């Protein structure tokens, strides 16, 4: 768990510093699901946590939340590639939905 904390803190620092790229798969989900880059950054840098880590690929799945409106939030999953020490790739981002996710942290049906 200590490693995941360090990974997440490193990702947050790089994202806050603007050292990230948003990949096309994430952009596609933004368009289809109605959220944007600002929402993604809010979810990553806020009260987020790594829910799956893929250390062999230098990637992780991060769960955070963003505001649709002042009193309305939504969970957001973001897959980040942290293989480069000074740059984060936001590989994809999506709102977890059934049947693939039962809850934002529990997987449902396989794709």
Image (cartoon, helix red, strand yellow):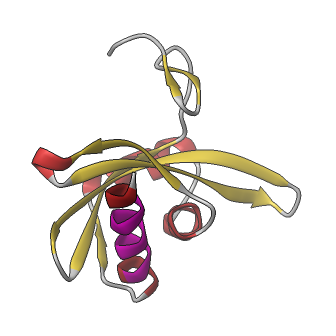
Name the one closer to the observer, 67 or 102.
Answer: 102
Image: magenta residue range: 5-13
Q: Position of residue 48 (x, y in %)?
A: 56, 57
Q: Looking at the image, is 18 positioned above or below residue 98?
A: below
Magenta-colored stretch includes residue 110:
no
Magenta-colored stretch includes residue 8:
yes
Residue lying at the far top in this picture: please name it.
109
- Left or right: where 92 falls relative to 102: left
Q: Residue placed at 48% from the left, 42% from the top?
A: 32
The quarter of the picture where the C terminus appears is top left
Q: Position of residue 39 (x, y in %)?
A: 58, 63
Q: Residue placed at 31% from the left, 83% from the top?
A: 19
Q: Position of residue 91 (x, y in %)?
A: 27, 54
Q: Main secondary structure of the magenta part?
A: helix
Q: Residue 7 occupies which quadrant of the picture?
A: bottom left
Q: Looking at the image, is 12 positioned above or below residue 96?
A: below
Residue lying at the far front in this picture: please name it.
2
Q: Residue placed at 66% from the left, 58% from the top?
A: 66
Q: Looking at the image, is 3 positioned above or below residue 28?
A: below
Q: Position of residue 59 (x, y in %)?
A: 23, 51
- Left or right: where 44 falls relative to 82: right
- Left or right: where 70 falls relative to 67: right
């Amino acid at each position: 768990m200590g490693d995941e904390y360090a990974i997440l803190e490193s990702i947050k620092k790089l994202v806050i510093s603007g050292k990230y790229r948003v990949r096309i798969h994430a952009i596609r989900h933004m368009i289809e699901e109605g959220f944007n880059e600002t929402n993604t950054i809010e979810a990553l840098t806020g009260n987020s946590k790594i829910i799956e880590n893929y250390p062999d690929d230098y990637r992780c799945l991060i769960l955070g939340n963003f505001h649709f409106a002042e009193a309305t939030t939504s969970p957001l999953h973001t897959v980040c590639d942290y293989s480069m020490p000074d740059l984060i790739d936001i590989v994809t981002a999506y709102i977890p939905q059934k049947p693939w996710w039962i809850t934002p942290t529990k997987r449902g049906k396989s794709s």
